Image: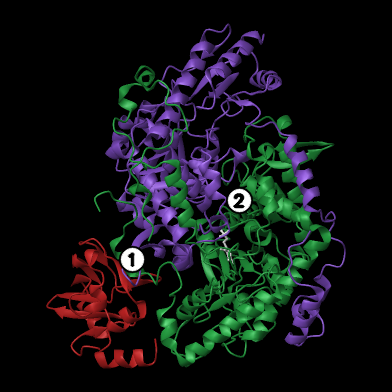
Chain colours: A green, B purple, C red
Amino acid sequence: MEKSIFAYQSEPTEYIKSGDSGAIEALIPERFLQRQEPDLPQATEQDVIRHFSRLAGLNYSVDTGFYPLGSCTMKYNPKINEAVADLPGLAGVHPYQDEKSIQGVLELAYGLEQFLLAVSGFQGLTLQPAAGAHGEITGILLIKAYHRLASKKEKRRIILVPDTAHGTNPATAALAGYEVRQVKSDEAGDIDLADLKQNLSPEVAALMLTNPNTLGLFEKNILQVSKMVHEAGALLYGDGANFNALLGLVKPADLGFDVMHFNLHKTFSTPHGGGGPGAGAVGVVEKLIPFLPVPLVKKKGEKFYFDYKVKHSIGKVRSFYGNFLIAVRAYAYFLALGEEGIKKVGRQSILNANYLLRKLKDVYEWPYRRSCMHEFVITPKTGWQVNTLDIAKRIIDYGYHPPTIYFPLIVHEAMMIEPTETETKNTLDEFSAALLSIAQEAQTTPELLKKAPVNSPVGRLDEARAARQLILKYEKAR
Amino acid sequence: MEYIGNTEADNKQMLTEIGVSSASELWSDIPQDKIVTQPLGLPAGLSELELRKHLRNLSDRNVNVEDYACFLGAGAYDHYIPSTVPVITKRPEFYTAYTPYQPEISQGTLQSIFEYQSLICNLTGLDVANASLYDGATALYEAAHLACDHTQRRKIIVSRALHPEYRQVLKTYFSDAGIDIEEIGCAQGTTDLGELRQKINDQVAAVLVQQPNFFGCLEEVEELATLVHEHKALFIVDVYPVSLGLLKRPGNYAADIVVGEGQSLGLPVSFGGPYLGIFSCRKELMRKMPGRVVGETVDNQGRRAYVLTLQTREQHIRREKASSNICSNEALCALAACVHLSSLGARGLKAAATASVIGAHRLADGLKDLPGWRLNFTAPFFNEFVATAPVEADDLNKQLLKHKIIGGLNLGRLYPELPQSVLFCVTEKRGPEEIENLLNILREIKQ
Amino acid sequence: MVPAELKYSESHEWVKQEGNTVIIGITDYAQEELGDIVFVEVPKPGRELKQKESFGVAESVKAVSDLFSPVSGKVVAVNEELSKTPELVNKEPYTGGWIIKVELSQAGELSGLMSAEQYEKLIKEGH
Ligand SMILES: Cc1ncc(COP(=O)(O)O)c(C=O)c1O
């Protein structure tokens, strides 16, 4: 238990000279001013640094260990990316500077767009969205604008999402004003073609599909799905959260996707920041380009410029141009790997996942018995006296971050494991040994799992109490 | 340069263990004719040395606020960042972790977010704050969305003195969604109360203003709040957090939701991002709040600990009924704000605000005495103000760049009613000699 | 635990008749499925409900369940205790954990609800 930043009682270090605070009354009328200072910490620089350094020590992270959190692509975050993102000519550029004074940043943004188009097969792109889910709403608004222009009568009011979909997909569709209909998965773990057919109608605007899907399986009927969706006059939205599997191997546009978001913080190695910032570029096919958010980055001769004249633009989805410094990191990643390196990413991620799966599939329940892509889902065997939560917590005791658990929702007690391509065989061997050992314990000493974790800064938390008593900020009195 | 650990031999051995003769068998579900065989068209990989040089070259081609004196604000502010901030945000334990789904090994992130929430509440004077949203503009949208949901009304009123890009974001999100957006004009640089009085009625879910507003002017927030609440609409205020070192806390003038762009709390201008969407609201609205929230609880040994809570609002549980679709947020930016505020303390924040206000007024005073210049508005202002120049704003700025000065924003492009107008911003980073220097140069620039 | 004297809906609410009003709560089975209940959203007294209309939600830490009214009528009282101690629904689902009181507008609807025996059969089949 680390004390609160509010518990310190020292003098803050002077970073900024106070100046003549008496002058303020002459400049700003009294009615606007706050008499009592805001309650902020009272800590010297040394206190602050120690406090937050100690907090850092309570975290697990990619840089401290293996982090096989499914669907999140916790690959290694190269350090050169961090270094270049600090360059004063990148971090220190104001978003409203004159175009002539920002040719370097525009070239970088333009270059990243070209790279993303090259690996995805799309024709147009925006870097404006700040994350995957933000890319989703951008993409769905593009689809909405497209249909609105195509037909004044406005009858496409439904968006289809598979039952394996990530929660952001239905949330996004509803946010954009659509009715959400769920499409079933079949026994093999693919979207159920018969159910899809039933649900497709002239009222459907789009199907939001993740491929590989959240079971870690490649939707093997993708070409058929894309054909059916397009024949119904709907568009195919791609949730690119799992694009890592396909990177360098296949281009989503070639599979029939009309629009897809990229999660730069997953596929393109930018760090996850303890929850963000990420970045969510959106790629589109030709016919959606006229709807993209403004501005677009264009090139004329050797000059780069912002183009605000996008005919049917949906407008803007955030201020300025997106999470630029995240784009810088993704750009650096592309340049480091280059053609040859990028081609290995998807392939190696698939190989690593299948290797780990091979080690675990006989000991854990393996609901979808197919080669996986970059991740896979397993569950505890029936009969074990423990559940997935217990296993996850025990994994902590073995020194690893647990996988994603209880997602996707269609698998009872799901455990979704994504090793990523940056991990070595050695790490995978050690991790699988830990999971096999835990499987043993689950059968012989389940109480070890129930009590886990014991090797962590705190034990299991009382989440019900947190939700009932709701202490959401520090209160002085306590 | 690649970041793959395995050797060819490792891979071979893995394939053997899997029981396939070639890796391509693993992706046999992919339609074979769709597998990429042609070059992607990417350049060859660079070494780290080459990469650094390349990025250094790109960086050198941009004017930046380290090498130039910046008088540009308009939603992105060049404030001083204590050296503590990058030291902490660059700790790999923070920046290479993800959302704290496993609280037992994420207490660092969780406690820092809890402290961030507390600091935001203390600044805004409201009851609760979330763990962050993408930026100020999307935070404003989320607030308007919440207001419509809470009041079950379908109209919002927005001041034209609110950041033009934020208003554009509102329009984009609400297009075709059955929500009306009505804009209210300005008088003397602040929201026109008379016009608002005419337009507001009991169908209005919320009124949205910015304090200080886009022109830097101070809105008569108390009068606004009273008017808005007479119609049982929500009063949503978009704040500039640094200003809260001096200005009245929105909770004290009965704002219902306070949002803001948190960039000015420890983040570089960064060509527009990553930034930080601040969101806080009254307790009654808490269960409809967007985004993640951290709460305090105890672990199984009774030790105080922190955990994500109120999760049933969120997309991973409530799916299409979620209060928002946000998943990844701006946690590291919230950490930066937390360290920034913890380092400065109330005195430091006040010092930054005070120095900014004094500097801006010094510049305004000097400008209004220059031939051909005039200040557009009479309303009290904070650290930004609008002045009309004797020359085109773009020409002016071109000249200033030669003197290593980044001039103010050309407002005419966003507000056709304000031709040749410039929005100037001064922060504590601009010393008196830089302001003097700017004035001297402007004096020389002829019509 | 399925009290014999109550009536049940397919969405796992129980109904206890007291003259022309009924008390409504969720069953022991339902609270068990949800886990630790942390919040119960209740309607404002005075609201008119139709049969099968959603009148609120019960939330655990990681799940949300809509509450459906087994009968039509006007909400005349809500259990105020639940705002402070939602766990009453877990601890005493059939007594202290009641949720709303409704004045019946279609008394005939009661006969369409399940008996304890029928409900027991339903949950045995795992619905
Ligand atoms: C399948 C899937 N879709 C969408 C998202 C949302 O992406 P983000 O968190 O970047 O908004 C995620 C990740 O969290 C995901 O795993």
Residue type for callout 2: Pro
Numbered marks: total: 2
Residue at 66 percent of width and 32 percent of height? B64
Residue at 68 percent of width and 70 percent of height? A423
SS for dot 1: loop
* Ligand 1 lies in quarter: bottom right
Label 2: few (<14), some (14–19) or many (≥20) C-alpha neighbours in 10 Å: many
Closest to the observer, B387 or B207: B387
- The reply to whether the residue tagged 2 has its Cβ within 8 angstroms of ligand 1 is no
Residue B256: give x, y in percent of width and height.
34, 44
Residue C121 makes an appearance in the image: yes
Which residue is denoted by mark 2 in the rendering? A129
**Position of the N terminus of chain B by quadrant:** bottom right
B445 left or right of B313?
Answer: right
The image quarter containing residue B440 is top right
Which residue is denoted by mark 1 in the rendering? B303
Relative to A308, is A231 above or below? below
Label 1: few (<14), some (14–19) or many (≥20) C-alpha neighbours in 10 Å: few
Q: Residue furthest front?
A: A46
Residue A47: give x, y in percent of width and height.
42, 46
Residue at 40 percent of width and 58 percent of height? B294
Question: What chain is tagged by disc 2?
Answer: A
SS for dot 2: loop
Marks 2 and 1 sit apart, C-alpha to C-alpha, by 39 Å
